[in-house]
Amino acid sequence: MLAYRSLKVWQTAMDLVMEAYALSRRLPGHERYALTSQLQRAAVSVPANIAEGNGRVHRGDYLHHLSIARGSLLELDTHLEVARRLNYLSERDLAEMHRLRGHVSRMLNALIARLRP
């Protein structure tokens, strides 16, 4: 098994992707190439950057990709807020996503802190 797959942060980020896809199915069809696509891409970017960073040789590269993953997490949060403000999703719809996002955020911050020189 590849090393990144054993990381709890990557595993939880993958759960976040599954939840993002489930929520995106609730968005109106006319958002397919706009909000839906952006939401899905931001979600996938989180575990993808964790994995890519983990595969890098230099710690600085790893930290850079973890930073990108954090940015993608905030981008995802913004897309979800847009969907909420447009009344496509309710706070209740977003409860599990917010829980997962917070968990991934805390784990990413902890991993970054451990890797910093």
Image (cartoon, rainbow, N blue to C red):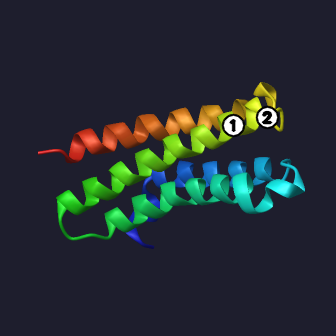
Which SS class for mark 2?
loop
Residue placed at 73% from the left, 55% from the top? 36
The residue located at (63%, 32%) in the rendering is 98
Q: Position of residue 53 (x, y in %)?
A: 33, 63
Q: Which residue is mark 1?
A: 82
Disc assigned to residue 31: none
Mark 1 element type: helix
Q: Badge 1 local density, few (<14 within 10 Å), some, or many (20+)?
A: some
**Residue furthest out toward the left:** 117
Are there few (<14), some (14-19), or many (20+) residues within 10 Å of tag 2? few
Marks 1 and 2 close (CB-CB < 8 Å): yes
The residue to which callout 2 is attached is 86
The amino acid sitting under disc 2 is Leu
Q: Quadrant of the N terminus?
A: bottom left
Left or right: residue 59 versus residue 28 is left
- What x and y, as percent, mark residue 59? 19, 59
x, y percent for residue 33: 74, 63
Q: Is residue 73 above or below residue 3?
A: above
